[in-house]
Image (tube, rainbow, N blue to C red):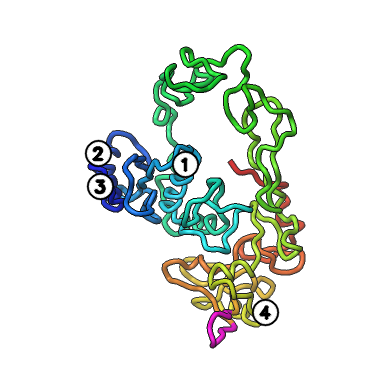
């Protein structure tokens, strides 16, 4: 066992060492999060290693149980696990809708529910660069489902509900003795359940985050909100400056801001001609370690070039390149490259044919 102290860093390291030496041999798992009622020092309510998923001592996080609101603490856990998956804190230009996102650097009310477009990019780069193989192993059901225990507050196989012990249960829909719904009840909880009844069909249960998302509505037959449906890929967005792609509206301007700050803009077309060279920085693809130049019609689907207005000496063709992270700084998939065209697989293709195999995109 470990000693949990108010030092978040010491507790994190102790927990990571214990996971590697003890917990991994008990139960196969990819990541462990420690919940603690200990008040962590200063304003810290959580801590985790970045880009550490699948590492024995570092695929861990520590979360303080600082609030009676389960969603607030859950958001903190999601935040720390986001760090494990390569996500950094959101900047002001990162977006997931009208409220703050999960990787914001400070807590908010209401608690965040979504990851931002920046988090999505960090995650994609993490998968590509670090290749966390442990996440590809499908767990067996016996590994993740414990024997059913009525009264533990967890909804398990064979239970209609579980509100805790009879002494603790505050749920008017659930019989704590049997973990069954009372005869007059059809549900106990969920975004489409109210006073033990399903909400009327058509009641909004998840608002649209932005113009590339769509609102979901209760069916009248379930307590759960239907799965998140997104606007179809290729739908114009941001006043026709881009096209929806997997729930986001990727445009070069926002990508430049993400790389170089709020004053950055897209560079002149001439800067993108560098992608014709297949040089260290300017290219469209890599093949066996060799940089492949862009075709003339695809130059805006390779390395992104921006005008950096943040300094006195403006750089008219600034780009981002790091040997350790060569994907960052490339034009993102789904970005508008010409009127009526988007970047797919580093090629500038007709938006009307780019997504023929999909009409929409679902998030689980």
In the picture of the structure, the residue carrying the numbered disc 4 is: 269
- Of callouts 4 and 3, which one flags the residue occurring earlier in the amino acid sequence? 3
Position of 329 relative to 87 (above/below)? below
Res 189 → quadrant: top right
State the CA–CA distance, disc 3 to disc 2: 12 Å
Q: Position of residue 273 (x, y in %)?
A: 63, 80
Q: Position of residue 102 (x, y in %)?
A: 51, 51
Residue sitting at x 37%, y 39% = 29
Report the span colored magenta.
308-316
Q: Is residue 45 left or right of residue 359?
A: left
Q: Nearer the viewer, mark 2 or mark 1?
A: 1
Residue 74 shows which numbered tag? 1
Position of 216 relative to 133 (above/below)? above
Residue sitting at x 43%, y 71% = 323
Question: Which residue is at the front of the view, 346 or 76?
Answer: 76
Q: Nearer the viewer, mark 4 or mark 1?
A: 1
Residue 22 shows which numbered tag? 2
Position of 58 relative to 194 (above/below)? below
Q: Nearer the viewer, mark 1 or mark 3?
A: 1
Q: Secondary structure at mark 4?
A: helix
Q: Secondary structure at mark 1?
A: helix
Asked whether the beta carbons under mark 4 and mark 2 sit within 8 Å of each other, the answer is: no
Which image quadrant: the N terminus? top left
Question: Which residue is at the front of the view, 223 or 4?
Answer: 4
Position of 364 relative to 267 (above/below)? above
């Amino acid at each position: 066992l470990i000693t949990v102290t108010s030092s978040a860093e010491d507790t994190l390291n102790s927990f990571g060492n214990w996971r590697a030496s003890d917990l991994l041999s008990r139960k196969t798992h990819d990541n462990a999060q420690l919940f603690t009622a200990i008040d962590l020092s200063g304003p810290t309510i959580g801590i985790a290693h970045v880009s550490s998923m699948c590492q024995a001592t570092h695929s861990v996080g520590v979360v303080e149980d600082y609030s009676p609101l389960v969603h607030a603490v859950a958001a903190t856990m999601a935040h720390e696990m986001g760090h494990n998956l390569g996500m950094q804190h959101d900047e002001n230009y990162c977006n997931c809708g009208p409220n703050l996102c999960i990787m914001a650097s400070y807590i908010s009310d209401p608690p965040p529910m979504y990851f931002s477009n920046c988090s999505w990019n960090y995650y994609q780069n993490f998968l590509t660069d670090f290749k966390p193989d442990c996440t590809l192993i499908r767990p067996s059901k016996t590994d993740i489902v414990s024997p059913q225990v009525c009264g533990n507050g967890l909804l398990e196989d064979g239970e209609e509900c579980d509100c805790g012990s009879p002494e603790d249960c505050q749920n008017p829909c659930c019989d704590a003795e049997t973990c069954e719904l009372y005869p007059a009840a059809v549900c106990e909880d969920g975004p489409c359940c109210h006073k033990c009844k399903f909400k009327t069909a058509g009641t909004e249960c998840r608002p649209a985050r932005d113009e590339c998302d769509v609102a979901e509505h209760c069916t009248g037959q379930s307590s759960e909100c239907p799965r998140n449906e997104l606007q179809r890929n290729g739908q114009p967005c941001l006043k026709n400056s881009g096209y929806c792609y997997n729930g986001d509206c990727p445009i070069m301007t926002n990508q430049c801001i993400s790389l170089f700050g709020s004053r950055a803009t897209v560079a002149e077309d001439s800067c993108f001609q560098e992608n014709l060279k297949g040089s260290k920085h300017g290219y469209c693809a890599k093949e066996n370690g060799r940089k492949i130049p862009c075709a003339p019609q695809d130059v805006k689907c390779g390395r992104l070039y921006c005008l950096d207005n943040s300094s006195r000496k403006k750089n008219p063709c600034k780009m981002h390149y790091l040997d350790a992270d060569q994907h960052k700084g490339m034009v993102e998939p789904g970005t508008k490259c010409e009127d009526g065209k988007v970047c797919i697989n580093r090629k500038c293709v007709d938006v009307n044919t780019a997504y023929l195999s999909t009409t929409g995109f679902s998030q689980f």
